[in-house]
Amino acid sequence: MSPRAVVVTCSTRAATGVYPDRGGPLVVEALRGWGFEVEDATVVPDGPAVAEAMEAALASEPDLLVTTGGTGLSPTDGTPEATRAVLDREVSGIAEAIRSAGVAAGVPTAMLSRGLAGTAGPTLVVNLPGSTGGVRDGLAVLEPVVQHALSQIRGGDH
């Protein structure tokens, strides 16, 4: 059986139609390519809707929940806070590696991302930035470790 993932885009502008969601479809396409069963991204505005979407996604106990957007420093960016509220354990190395990959790719502002990663019950949760470049950098970091991480969450060996 294929692992199952949920993708949530956290962006008021995308949710209200100011511009199309670009990050969510990139994540969905990548995860499908990695063998995940995943529906199209859910797009929600910044604020309480992010926590609601995450809680709804986690209720179905997917193997992986990936968010994109809402990780910066603007007053409305609250994805990390919503994420912290649902995590049982943080896996800070994933978030640190995503920031480092962005900086290494020549984007010094990647270090400003406050994205988190961790586990919520049986689910690996990862916050990616909202920019398409940040999404691509984050996916490149995640791809070689995600299956091993999921195996460990299920009790597999190191």
Image (tube, grey):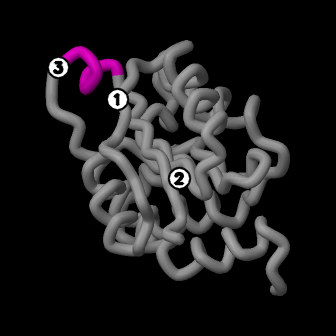
Mark 3 / mark 1, whichever is N-terminal: 3
Residue marked by disc 3: 17
Distance from label 3 to label 1 (Cα)?
A: 10 Å
Residue 51, position in %: x, y? 60, 23
Judging by the rendered image, the residue that carries numbered circle 2 is 111
Of 107 and 134, nearer the camera is: 134
Would you name the residue on which mark 1 appears?
Answer: 43
Return the residue nearer the eye: 156 or 104: 156
Say if mark 3 contacts mark 1, CB within 8 Å: no
Q: Which residues are magenta?
A: 12-17
Residue 79, by quadrant, is top right
Q: Is residue 16 magenta?
A: yes
Q: Would you call the spot at circle 3 few (<14 residues within 10 Å), some (14-19), or many (20 or more)?
A: few
Q: Residue at x 51, y 30 (%)?
A: 73
Residue type highlighted by circle 1: Val
Helix, strand or loop: magenta stretch: helix
Q: Earlier in the sequence, mark 2 or mark 1?
A: 1
Distance between mark 2 and mark 1 Cα atoms: 25 Å
What kind of residue is marked 3?
Answer: Gly
Specify whether residue 102 is painted magenta: no
Task: Where is residue 103? Give x, y as percent.
Answer: 45, 64
